[in-house]
Image: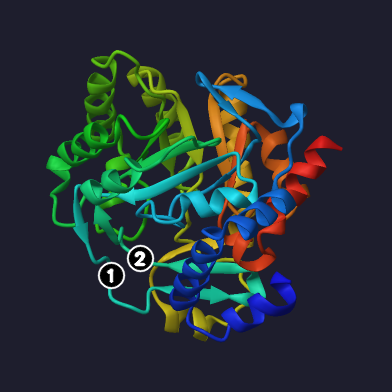
Amino acid sequence: MYKALIKPLAFRLSAEKAHSIVTKSFLTLGKIPILRSLIKSYFDVNHPSLKRDFLGLSFKNPVGLAAGFDKDGKYYKAMSLLGFGFIEIGTVTPKGQNGNPQPRLFRLPKDEALINRMGFNNDGVEALVTRLQKAKDLDFIIGGNIGKNKVTPNENAKDDYAICFEALYLYVDYFVVNVSSPNTPNLRALQDKGPLKEILRTVQDINQSKTNPKPILLKIAPDLTDGQLDDIIEIVEATDIDGVIATNTTIARSPLVTSQNRIEEIGNGGLSGKPVQDRSTAVIRYLSEKTNGSLFIIGVGGINSPASAKAKLDAGASLIQIYSGLVYEGPSLIKKINQSLIE
């Protein structure tokens, strides 16, 4: 149904408008009890072999929804009907911000890819907290992806991450520190050793002051060199955080089938989807091999089939996340991956 009907109609609209219409429509359908039950029964795959226990958390399956799809916690309950084992919301910032001017989300159908320069558009952490306070009896794990406001200078970035961490602490199961989006000016400079250690130590100090500390992960870019990845390993160990999410979108534009003229017309942004598949897997493999498999990794980037999901897991990821694959393959992708893992 998705590829035959929904996708052709959605692809006639701009990418951001299609995302809004499809998610809002699905949210409405999910509120109708009989439809909610039918959707859940079709997509949900339950099997003991799918369960994963990591970081003190129990995941019903290893397939998660990546951050960026539900920035404001509006759709996570509806999206859970599609069979995800965990859902990551955000990136959220202390204050709401509009993000970059539209258009800022683009499809590259020939490459099964997306380019986005959203710019951390979100309603702010307090609005997100208000929505999460209504959550009851959830049967999946929720992660909170946190960032800094565009207007916050990098030297004060740790304060923004601290604000988001404190506000969300009671309402999410794990945290992700996002310093790897290419769409907030100078944000990736925070991946350098000094500022990154400062941010992670700040949130870790807050975390360890709590009665029940939450897992903290770091989301990294696929564009890091091996030397920078070595630094990431050292920083994870030095700050005693729990692991990494590999990887975010890439600023690279090669190799692509889409014409160079179209790429130049689109302009700046992070590339996701099939073109980043191999690089993100290579980053996972490098980190895993360098740490003898001791580093906890969530693998994300270009997963569009059971085979590409398995490649991430074989490379060293313990869990995986998808986003662009949903756009091109539809929600049945989650079910196919989970079924293949059982088989």
Q: Nearer the viewer, residue 266 or 173?
A: 173
For label 2, the residue is 118
In this picture, residue 34 sits left or right of residue 24: right
Counting labels gives 2
Measuring from the top left, give residue 137's x and y in whole percent.
Answer: 48, 35
Quarter assignment of residue 99:
bottom left
**Amino acid bearing label 1:** Asn
Is residue 144 visible in the rendered image? The answer is yes
The answer to which of marks 2 and 1 sits earlier in the sequence is 1
Vertical comparison of 167 with 118: above or below: above
- How far apart, in angstroms, are the residues tagged by discs 2 and 1? 6 Å
Q: Badge 2: few (under 14), some or many (20 or more) residues near its Cα, within 10 Å?
A: many
Q: Residue at x 37, y 79 (%)?
A: 103
Vertical comparison of 241 with 276: above or below: above
Quadrant in which the C terminus is drawn: top right
Q: Nearer the viewer, residue 240 or 126?
A: 126
The numbered mark at residue 264 is none
Q: Residue at x 65, y 82 (%)?
A: 8
Measuring from the top left, give residue 89's x and y in whole percent.
Answer: 41, 47
Type of colouring = rainbow
For label 1, the residue is 100
Instruction: Find out whether the residues at labels 2 and 1 contact each other: C-beta distance under 8 Å.
Output: yes
**Mark 2 residue element:** loop
Measuring from the top left, give residue 210's x and y in whole percent.
Answer: 26, 16
In this picture, residue 308 sits left or right of residue 293: right
**Mark 1 residue element:** loop
Q: Badge 1: few (under 14), some or many (20 or more) residues near its Cα, within 10 Å?
A: some
Is residue 226 visible in the rendered image? The answer is no
Residue lying at the far right in this picture: please name it.
343
Measuring from the top left, give residue 9's x and y in whole percent.
Answer: 61, 83
Q: Residue at x 20, y 57 (%)?
A: 96
**Amino acid bearing label 2:** Met
